[in-house]
Amino acid sequence: MNKHMEAKKLSDSQIMEGAIVWGDSIAEAAQFQFITKLQNAVKERGIVEAVPFCNLEGTQITADLESQFGISIKRVASRARNKSNLPIGMEIELLDAYKYNAENDIANRPNIQKIEDGKVLLYTKAIVIKDKFCLSCHGIPKVDIQPQTLKKINELYPQDSAKNFAVGDLRGMWSIRLPKKEVVIKL
């Protein structure tokens, strides 16, 4: 019998745990690809010329992941450089919860919420500034962000609010929409 045709009796708990595992693997793949490709862009072009990377090439990375996994993925942040990365709907509440946890020294863990009448599971995971590399574009202007880099950021993103972060700060979150049917098939 075709694996996709098998009848499975799974509890909500098993489905949610499966969604967390799958979401974790996608978020880790996304983070790895972003950081690796960004570091390569900086090596090849320098920080100033790599500034457009997250917008231009970042969009392609998420599109490739969506195609590969059959999901919808985006980075969201309330202090966004690119306005298309602002949270919407339930993402606002979830990002606020991550902010609250960060401000109160509570560990941020991945989260799963049922949306679209339970047909989709929304996986979210905090994105934290891990090291000084990120501060080259997201740190304090003229301290972490060099003047030429700051000029390029301001030219490309005149409404930018994604600066003044420090290592360990919450930068935003991954928002991944997982079709419940696909989660069940993977179990």
Image (spheres, rainbow, N blue to C red):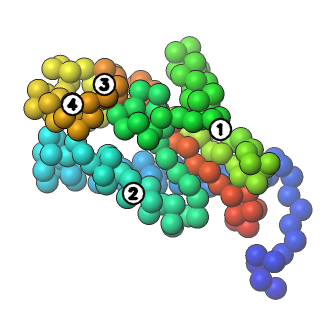
Disc 2 to disc 4, C-alpha distance: 24 Å
Question: Badge 2 is on which residue?
Answer: 61
Q: Is residue 36 left or right of residue 91?
A: left
Callout in the foreground (4, 3): 4
Q: Is residue 87 left or right of residue 41?
A: right
Disc 4 to disc 3, C-alpha distance: 11 Å
State the quadrant of the C terminus. bottom right
Disc 1 to disc 3, C-alpha distance: 26 Å
Disc 1 to disc 2, C-alpha distance: 22 Å
Q: Residues within 10 Å of mark 1 (few under 14, many from 20)?
A: some
Kindly check if marks 1 and 2 are in contact, taking CB atoms under 8 A apart as contact: no
Q: Earlier in the sequence, mark 4 or mark 1?
A: 1
Q: Residues within 10 Å of mark 4 (few under 14, many from 20)?
A: few
Kindly check if marks 2 and 3 are in contact, taking CB atoms under 8 A apart as contact: no
Q: Secondary structure at mark 2?
A: helix
Q: Nearer the viewer, residue 40 or 86?
A: 86
Q: Decide if residue 96 is in sight here.
A: yes
Amino acid found under the numbered disc labelled 4: Asn
Question: Badge 4 is on which residue?
Answer: 154
Q: Residues within 10 Å of mark 2 (few under 14, many from 20)?
A: some
Which residue is rendered at x = 24% and y = 45% of the image? 52
Question: Badge 1 is on which residue?
Answer: 111
Q: In the image, which disc is placed on residue 163?
A: 3
Residue 43 horizontal/vertical position (percent)? 15, 50
